[in-house]
Amino acid sequence: MTLLHVTAQHSHHCSIIIHGKERRRKRKRKPETETEPGPPPRSVSLQSDESKGNGCPPAKRSKMEASVKEQLLGVLDDLGEEELDRFHWHLQNGGDFTPIKKSRLEKASRTTTVDLMVETYTTDHVMEVARLILKKMKKGTPPTQEASSLSSESEKTLQWCQLKLKSKLKAEFQSVFEGIAKAGNPTLLNQIYTELYITEGGTAEVNDEHEVRQIETASRKTKKTETPIRQEDIFKLPPGRDEPIRTVLTKGVAGIGKTVLTQKYTLDWAEDKANQDIQFIFPFTFRELNVLKEEKFSLMELVHHFFTETKEAGICSFEDSQVVFIFDGLDECRLPLDFHKTTILTDPRKSTSVDVLLINLIRGKLLPSARLWITTRPAAANQIPPDCVDMVTEVRGFTDPQKEEYFRKRSRDKEQASRIISHIKTSRSLHIMCHIPVFCWITATVLEDVLETREGGQLPKTLTEMYIHFLVVQAKVKKVKYDGGAETDAHWSPESRKMIESLGKLAFDQLQKGNLIFYESDLTECGIDIRAASVYSGVFTQIFKEVRRLYQVENKVFCFIHLSVQEFLAALHVHLTFKNSVISLLEEQQTTSDESETEEYAETDLYMTAVDKALQSPNGHLDLFLRFLVGLSLQTNQTLLEGLLTQTGSSSQTNQETVQYIKKKLSKNLSGEKSINLLHCLNELNDRSLVEEIQQSLRSGSLSTDKLSPAQWSALAFILLSSEDDLDVFDLKKYTASEKALLRLLPVVQVSNKALLSSCNLSEEGCEDLLSYLSSKSCSLRELDLSTNSLKASAVKHLSTAVQSPKLKILRLNICELSERSCEALSSLLSSWSGTLTELDLSINSLQDSGVKLLSARLQSLNYKLNTLRLKVCGFSEISCDYLTAALKSNPSQLRQLDLSNSDLRDSGLKLLSAGLKSCAVETLSLSGCLITEEGCTSLASALSSNPSHLRELDLSYNHPGDSGMKLLSAGLKDPGWRLDTLRYEGNV
């Protein structure tokens, strides 16, 4: 049975991927053939001091030293006296190397200079120092044949090193082990790799929501507004961006494919398929760097430590090379990354602790020309300051077509692959979870086994059924492969039962502590024999691997292949403990039930306690655990575990009482996510009555939203989120324009791109609840219409304080009873959204001149991206035109549309505004009903005649321009110097 894998600490290695996490180990070196590239002739030695003299006889070493001295002397002989003085000056000042004291160089001849340099830098480094100085003196154009030869030899050395590194990385990454991959059969990465959906955007802020909740939210997001990024283009500039991308931070939940993504990037480079402008790629994992916590390295020593090819080539600088460093698994970092207190380090040859190296590399102080790619789970994304990250990307896993591609690539049986794909589509919970590549592997493992061994048998539809089948498959593999049993033998033995009990205890104990990775001592406490557990790698894996290529380390770190597997085993442990001893592990004081208390009552109480604990969790960390626990209470699921469970059976009354308790909780005022999870729990209990009732009403068109209970509203939200219909636009009026309806459907709002919430009588409390969803890291909303709601100043204050980093592009607050008092809060809101908001509608609110003054002051910010501003019927006068003109002049390139209709601007106001039009990019201007006469038209015509003027559309309807004013502006339509092509003037007198 393969639930646990322990990495063997041997010198012959293989490459293993568990759930997309790669376990890299050295392979046996193949004997080098005559065609394999060897090191170039090394008349120039660049080796480090550590390798000095290794494998080189003294006589040969002495001969090499003499040759290097002669070569260096030849270089110095070609320098004039003034050039030699400059050469000495560089030696005295160092910078990239150890300086030589001025007193020793003052009267030094050329031969003495050679001796001093060899004494200081050794023959291994002296020519590299000479090359660096010559480059500084001559800007990379060596003056002599010897120096040219030196540069040529150095180039050959770099090319040789690159070939060796590519060869090693190909061997390391070309074969992977997916999950347990039938316990030892490698698969070519290029054969099974399926493109992942990667998007740009978001921030490096922490997201501590349960990762399954995050993936469920991501699965519902529409892709219309997002541009996917291919892995080979991760450092390429997106359209509209000029600054180069040095550091990319890629977020993604566990098992989503971040590690395999970096492996594919590296393999494509090593196989000369992509990114050949890069000279070196150095992939690291934080797991292996953690082991070096107490040691000291320079940056070059760290590279030499992991990539011995660079040491063999004697490379001691990458300043002239295009280098990519990959750091995988920031969430597993145990190094103290303190970006505020760490000393600045710029010398790549100076030794320090690994954390100081990393911080200065990420800051750009060390090797600023290098590119960095860091991957992390969302909860650890904030360990790196935002100003150190040039672009944040997110791995969303598989899209629906990519899921199908994965299953078809995995299975050689086309008919079987089609059946698997069709079955997953019938279960929305399975379909959503298949966004995670590791869950696709679990699903394929189970369904392939069921289809091959149980013809006509029912395929698992719920998560609990899927994970029970997965555990049984692992038991079968262990029995047949490791114990020599037959396929028909009983899967469970006393030893395997004990192992599962121990793994369950470990899973539960660590889940209680919030731990996803653990150490050997944790295993020992749970009675797990690591050697005996080594065949259980399908569920449990040692995630520590020895630091590559150098030496073995005894510290071992472990984790389950995915947190969902840990939560399943934790639920199984609670279930087994109760069944075997009637002890509830969820009670604060664990005691057996009283004699007077029936086991049936105690079991019902267990599930009620679990529901309560899950609802109390602020981030949903027990959501999936609860689904599995209630699912295990079903007799049909317990039958599947026959042989593992010594006692089976929960009464139908217990199940019904649990269902009723969950429905009772659904009638309370729960948040959207908690309600959705309880409906998932009902699904695990095979109770779909609530959902089916609403579905029937929707199909018949008889859904009466006025009479829906809270539980029925939650069911409606569940249906909308589970449907395959496009959730791009959420219009509350389709259901009922009430705050009660809105609050129950907030999870749907959260995953929509556009929310139309006008006229729903939103209260201050309702506004606060709405904005808690808007501030969620997983919120997709781009456009929000809150028009015709009485928001007032206090509600706007919530709007500005609750949302610090929104994705909103368009906000409509027209007819919201906003006053000049609201503008201070609005000003704060604009400050929060300055980088994203592109359209703001504040029409038909009594903002007055004082309100416009506050808004205009905020609009003067240079980083503002607002291009449409509507201030129609806002009760301000001509003095506000002065404020708006100042804003237009200070930030001239952004605003494109400005609507000031039905305002008391008059000619004096238009004259002020016209001054701003001469130096801004406004293309559409609405001045309908602004009491403008011929005088104002003259000012406007002057502005439109200015070069450049961007105005293309002008609305002057319902004003008093007179014949002369209209004639003046109409003539401009024919003037090639004007850009105006649309003039509205209906209703003028």
Image (cartoon, helix red, strand yellow):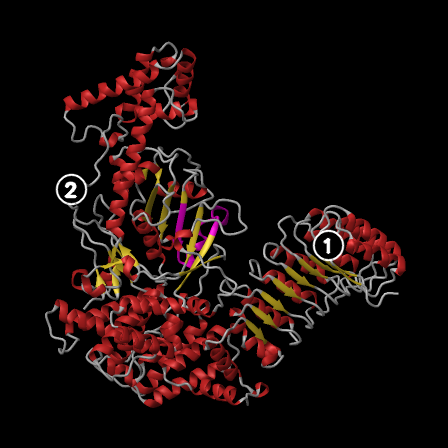
- Mark 2: secondary structure: loop
Q: Is residue 468 above or below residue 109?
A: below
Question: Tag 1, which secondary structure?
Answer: loop
Residue sitting at 35 percent across and 19 percent down? 144
678 in the magenta segment? no
Mark 2: give few (<14), some (14-19) or many (20+) Cα within 10 Å: few
**Residue 52: where, in percent of width, then height?**
22, 29
- Viewport quadrant of the N terminus: bottom left
- Position of residue 491 measured from the top left corner of the image (x, y, whole percent): 17, 76
| First of labels 1, 2 by sequence position | 2
User: At x 24% / y 61%, what residue is drawn?
Assistant: 523
Q: Where are the magenta residues, as a range?
A: 372-391
Q: Identify which amino acid the numbered label 2 is placed on.
A: Thr
Residue toward you, 847 or 520: 847
Q: Is residue 695 above or below residue 851?
A: below
Residue in the picture at 26% in, 34% down = 313
Q: In the image, residue 676 lies at what x, y percent?
A: 46, 76
**Residue drawn at the location 28% of the way across and 85% of the way down:** 636
Q: Which quarter of the picture shows residue 507? A: bottom left
Residue 24 appears in the picture as rendered? yes
Residue 839 in the figure: left or right of residue 949: left
Residue 33 — which label? 2
- Pick the quarter of the image with the C terminus: bottom right
Residue 518 visible within the image: no
Residue 951's label in the rendered image is: 1
How many tags in the picture? Answer: 2
In the rendered view, does 41 fall on the left or right side of 785?
A: left
| Residue situated in front as seen by the camera: 756 or 566 | 756
Gap in Å between the C-alphas at discs 1 and 2? 72 Å
Numbered label attached to residue 58: none
Residue neighbourhood size for the residue with mark 1, other residues' Cα within 10 Å, grouped as few (<14), some (14–19), many (≥20): many
Magenta stretch encompasses residue 382: yes
